[in-house]
Image (cartoon, rainbow, N blue to C red):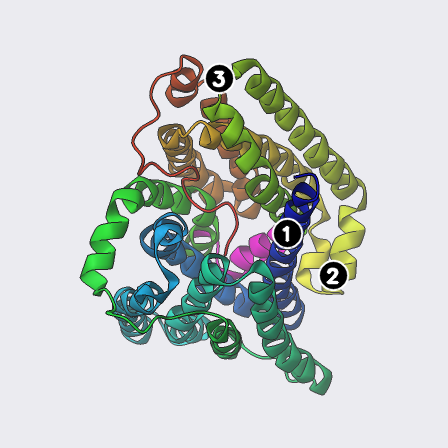
Amino acid sequence: MSAAVPARARRWAGALLGTLADQGLFSGANFLMNLLLARWLEPSAYGSFSVAFNAFLLLAGFHGALVLEPMSVRGARRDPASGYVSGLVRLHFVLTVPVSVLLAAVAATVVPPGSLRAAGLGLALAFPFSLLFWLARSACYLQASSWHAAGASAAYAAALLGPLAWMGLRGSAPGAFLAFVLMAAASLVGFGIAWKGLAPGGGARPSWRELLRDHWPYGRWVLPTAVANGIYALAYVPLLAAVAGLVAAGSFRALQNLVLPLQQALAAAHTLLVLPRLARQASSSDGAAFEQSARRLVWLALLASAAYAGVLWVGGPWLLRALYGTSLYATLGWAVPPLAASAVLWGLALALSTVLRARHRPDAILWSKTAGAVALLGLGWPAVATWGLRGALWSLVAATAVECLVLAVGPGRRAAREGQPAGDANTPISSGSMTAP
């Protein structure tokens, strides 16, 4: 028995390291791509790419609600040889190809000629293939191992960053359309590596309608949150583009790149390390231990976010110059204070939402994201119309503060403290992905 425990611990440690490697390679590749494009492209062209990339993330939330998140729960109970993953690939194309055709039609007929149209067409091309790779990576955790997913992400990173580096050395930076083409090609490379380690199954493949019906009881909880979170978290870039112009939209995205390392590290730690332990404590009878762990988590998240924000506050202007050279974004040092404040509030909101997810309270998460969306619509639009980029940054601080307030004292939080039932077995622990797959 004593020898079995260390062996089990080693397996879990290896799986965790593989997961962290997978997340780091995949998120890091996309992060570096954004940095390089912000450094190379004209501000309006990078603004166009930012608008299209945010639209991709918004649409990916719906895909995650109907395919990826239900797969993590439903798929764990299925036989790998049942044809489940092959069926999901078919469902994936049923959902994504019509969206891709619609995006292409809108970009070609509605969007004026220029960099925004090119970005929209690139998004339409990349959309199904990029999410196909997300699906394959998630399936690796069901059938193979986290290290196989990490290998696929390494192939994706090499296929994406290699051509970008080659173009940069030649002095021929890609435009927004070509950047999405590279994402699509790299996703297909990563999918090919991931698919080799999967067991698609040789039996009767379930139909996409059957799989959609099977996923719906779980996905119905995630979809409303995906909508609210999309409005709240992803609408600032298109709002800036519509009201203040593409240059302001690109500037906002370039500033967001400064806080992405904190957000990705904290989100991964909460999802992979903290949430499973808290969920086990929440399901046990030891409520005191859970409350103690919850308070410790909130304080640690606040300290980590405040430390990062302090470094950002002091070194932000220098970091902008180091990352973006002599471009417009290097002159945005005045934007560091609201960016640092939003980073601290974001860390607090993440910790509070993790506590509620552990209690199976998707209603509380939905309330908080809805409040943030309402704050955006009520404060963000007039603030952007009046003060442009400055208004967007400070309205983001206000909206994140509203989210924290609802998470701390809202109806979902009160219900959790009073021990009200959390819902049925189809209620997800995590209402919406905290990290992109």
Q: Are marks 2 and 1 in contact (CB under 8 Å)?
A: no
Q: Residues within 10 Å of mark 2 (few under 14, many from 20)?
A: some
Q: Are marks 2 and 3 in contact (CB under 8 Å)?
A: no
Which residue lies most toward the bottom here? 170
Residue 13 coordinates in the image, percent (x, y): 67, 49
Q: Quadrant of residue 6?
A: top right
For residue 399, side relative to residue 423 (left or right): right
Q: Nearer the viewer, residue 297 or 3?
A: 3
Residue 384 belongs to the span the image colors magenta: no
Q: In the rendered structure, which disc, 2 or 3, sits on the residue that comes first in sequence?
A: 3
Asked which secondary structure carries label 2, the reply is helix
Tell how many labels: 3
User: Residue at 48% across / 66% down in the picture?
Assistant: 48
Residue 315 coordinates in the image, percent (x, y): 80, 46
Please give the residue where the numbered disc 1 appears in the rendered image: 11
Q: Quadrant of residue 80?
A: bottom left
Please give the residue where the numbered disc 3 appears in the rendered image: 285
Vertically, is 167 above or below 342?
below
User: Residue at 65% across / 32% down in the picture?
Assistant: 301
Amino acid bearing label 2: Leu
Residue 248 belongs to the span the image colors magenta: yes
Q: Residues within 10 Å of mark 1 (few under 14, many from 20)?
A: few
Label 2, label 1: how far apart the Cα atoms are? 39 Å
Amino acid bearing label 3: Ser
Amino acid bearing label 1: Arg
Q: Residues within 10 Å of mark 3 (few under 14, many from 20)?
A: few
Asked which secondary structure carries label 3, the reply is loop
Asked which secondary structure carries label 1, the reply is helix
Frontmost of labels 2 and 3 is 3
Label 2, label 3: how far apart the Cα atoms are? 50 Å
Please give the residue where the numbered disc 2 appears in the rendered image: 323
Q: Which mark is residue 53?
A: none
